[in-house]
Amino acid sequence: MGSQWVGMGAGLMRIPIFAETIERLHAVLEPKELDLKKILTETGPDAFDDILKSFVGIAACQIALTNVMTAIGVVPDGIIGHSLGEQACAYADGCLTEEQTVLSAWARGAACKDATLIKGMMAAVGLGYKDVLPRLPPTIDVACHNSSTSCTLSGPAEDVELFVKQLSDIGVFAKTVDVASIAYHSRYIQTVAPFFQERVESFLPKPKRRSSKWVTTSVPLDKQDEDWARLCSAEYLTNNLLSPVLFEEALQHIPQQAVVIEIAPHGLLQAILKRALPEPVHIPLTRRGETNAARFLLDAIGKISCASTVCDLSVLYPDTEFPVPRATPSVANLAILDVENADNRDPYKIIAEKVRCPSF
């Protein structure tokens, strides 16, 4: 939550695999009276006025980006999710289908709207959870263990806002987070559980076992061997919604020389990841407000190719229809010869002159 931004999917719709995925997910959500394509492409002030839009929009981007990564040959050795991101883990791990994943995101939002909740607030704080606990007012919970120098708090709106001011006054970074007045991952959201779990059980009757690749961020170490914690079930996903996010603990499983790819509408966790794990290569696939999201994604794929997996880019483009006319000139040899002797001239213009066609 928080990685969403207006128009976040518009530029990525130029990638056929991404667009085809969104079309399928759009059809799944239509009976729920949600227009996914509009959610991902509209830029008006009401783009995310409903919590449902945020949840399904983020999940849809994660599913589609995962499909792109899979298609080009990027297979993860490990998978870690932050909060809602664990549902994307379930998809990447093969535990949920596309349809089940986006419906899980819908169920999350619908359940929050059905339950009676206090006016809540969350806040990002520049202290680790161990450092903030001694100062924490009794009405506020630590919602997310982000790293040794970062955590997220959750609780009643007035109490959180007051504590944020107190921390800011003594020079500690603290900022409230727009979460539609819902205190996620705290004691104040427990009433959401039955609404969410019942919905998930309706489309996930036979849960699958989580693989060893998926490092949980919602089950404490002393409970990870319990049967329910090993399954990607309605119970597991409900626990994910209600419990603190143990992201800092999960980061300990990432090797120092790893390539860490963040899959979200925006690389929201980059600052946290780079401080917590300075050795690995960190690659976000997207960036908030990017005017050419497709190019940013291709740049990211280039970095992945340099750092780790050699990616198959051919799957991102439409198939070339053959045969082409016999008289069609080849520009390959011209590019090689003239780029070397171009004297700083634009090589594309040189090629255009050689084949007597308009400049590219």
Image (cartoon, rainbow, N blue to C red):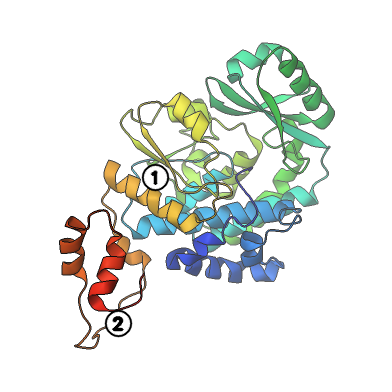
Residue of label 1? 211
Viewer-proximal residue, 155 or 169? 169
Viewer-proximal residue, 357 or 332? 357
Instruction: Categorize mark 2 by other alpha carbons within 10 Å: few (<14), some (14-19), many (20+).
Output: few
Viewer-proximal residue, 249 or 53? 53
**Residue 350: % across, % down:** 26, 67
Quadrant hosting residue 319:
bottom left
Report the disc number at residue 321. 2
* Circles 2 and 1 in contact, beta carbons < 8 Å: no
**Residue placed at 33% from the left, 30% from the top?**
255
Quadrant hosting residue 162:
top right
**In this orientation, does residue 200 appear?**
no
**Residue 37: % across, % down:** 61, 66
Q: As drawn, is 312 to the left or to the right of 246? A: left
Q: Amino acid at mark 1?
A: Ser
Q: Amino acid at mark 2?
A: Glu
**Residue placed at 66% from the left, 70% from the top?**
30
From the image, which quarter does the C terminus lie in? Answer: bottom left
Instruction: Categorize mark 1 by other alpha carbons within 10 Å: few (<14), some (14-19), many (20+).
Output: some
Q: In this picture, is 189 found above or below 112?
A: above
**Residue placed at 81% from the left, 30% from the top?**
156
Q: In this picture, is 314 found above or below 252?
A: below
Viewer-proximal residue, 308 or 141? 308
**Residue 110: % across, % down:** 73, 54
**In this orientation, does residue 302 appear?**
yes
**Residue placed at 72% from the left, 47% from the top?**
194
